[in-house]
Image (cartoon, grey):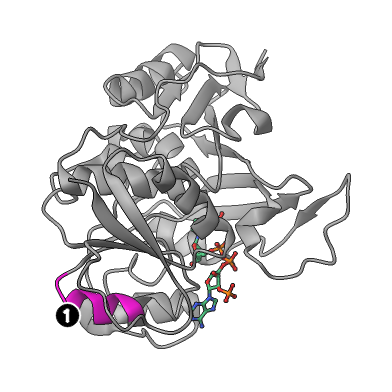
Amino acid sequence: MSETVAVWGASGNAGRELVGILEDHPEVGEIEKAGRRFPKGIDHIETAFLALPHGESAKIAARLKKTGRKVIDLSGDLRFSTPEEYERWYDIPHPAPDLLPVPYALPEWDTGQIESSELVAMPGCYPTATLLGINPLVQAGVLAHEARIQVNAVSGFSGRGNQPMPEVQYGNLIPYAVGRQHRHVGEMELFTLGHEINFAPSTIDQYRGMLVTITAQLATKGICDEMVHGILEDEYRDDDFVAVLDDGELPTFKTGAGTDMCYIGATADNCAATIVSAIDNLRKGAASQAVQVFNRMHGYDEAMGLTPNQPAEYTTSCR
Ligand SMILES: NC(=O)c1ccc[n+]([C@@H]2O[C@H](COP(=O)([O-])OP(=O)(O)OC[C@H]3O[C@@H](n4cnc5c(N)ncnc54)[C@H](OP(=O)(O)O)[C@@H]3O)[C@@H](O)[C@H]2O)c1
């Protein structure tokens, strides 16, 4: 029997994308679109997706958790383990500290936590693209001791929510929050084993899409293209939503846009590795990744209602 789900923030960029995916999901029946007022009756809702601004989301999550609903939070409210870390990066007291910690639900890092959880935190869009690209090298220990990780990122303007953006001009690329100002720096550094991140995000005049270029010094000159590729391929061989491109190929901004995939290209040269990762900020960076997690929480096929294993289009050469 199909289940009733609710989407808080359904009128927003991420929420609208999510509703579109859920409408075609074979196990989803009714989709309740919750507005700013908490609905009177929620007995019929089995799972709630929260696509709300940070600061608001955790308050709703706390109310829903008391009623035993499954909750998938797309905001930044529940990504840090402690209220102190949250306050350090979000500049406000945590709205529901008793909820912490909850699993950080990047499906490709499954440790069985997603399946057994009632409440999970979805990763941010920049961290999704960045961590899927660099984390296998961090874990393999091939980065130079204390190497900084430089992350240059370009996002579609839907990543900035419904805020008016008068500064976005057609044909322009707008840097913002460069250095260590962006909240996602703190989120990414939760997983980089002490490697600091320098982050340079920009917004482009496209609605959707994200291209992240990551560079980091390698431990020795002997670590070549082939080894870096081998690490990435071993990591993602069994994952349907991450594709490592052939040696010499890089994804472009358009490669990930409109897909549920993360496409990764890599090259290693002169002691440094460069990883290029492309996603759709609204899909693998938000809505379709949340549906991957929804599927796992319910024991459905992870790909139900989604489009995995899509071959890459719009690639370019790194030579
Ligand atoms: N956009 C992305 O690429 C992306 C990627 C990953 C994660 N996320 C996260 O997803 C969340 C939503 O992002 P978005 O880009 O979709 O933002 P958005 O376009 O600005 O949408 C925000 C949604 O939240 C609702 N809302 C705003 N203030 C509220 C309040 N005080 N109480 C209840 N509802 C409120 C809005 O409703 P109204 O229509 O009534 O204003 C709207 O439906 C954010 O936490 C964001 O960090 C976004």
Amino acid type, residue under disc 1 in the picture: Lys
Tell me which residue sits at (58%, 12%) in the image. 248
Q: Which residues are magenta?
A: 60-68
**Alpha-carbon neighbours of circle 1 within 10 Å: few (<14), some, or many (≥20)?**
few
Closer to the camera, 267 or 69?
A: 69
Tell me which residue sits at (23%, 58%) in the image. 103
Closer to the camera, 48 or 147?
A: 48
Where is residue 288 drawn, in percent x and y?
42, 43
Give left or right: position of 156 versus 304: right
Tell me which residue sits at (31%, 32%) in the image. 303
Magenta segment: does it hold 266? no
The number of numbered discs placed on residues in the rendered structure image is 1
Magenta span dominant secondary structure:
helix
Give left or right: position of 270 versus 187: right
Q: Which quadrant of the figure contains the N terminus?
A: top left
Residue 274, placed above or below residue 175: above
Where is residue 270 drawn, in percent x and y?
57, 23
Where is residue 4 drawn, in percent x and y?
27, 57
Report whether residue 127 is seen: no
Residue ID for mark 1: 66
Q: Which quadrant of the figure contains the C terminus?
A: top right
Residue 201, placed above or below residue 271: below
Where is residue 286 drawn, in percent x and y?
46, 51
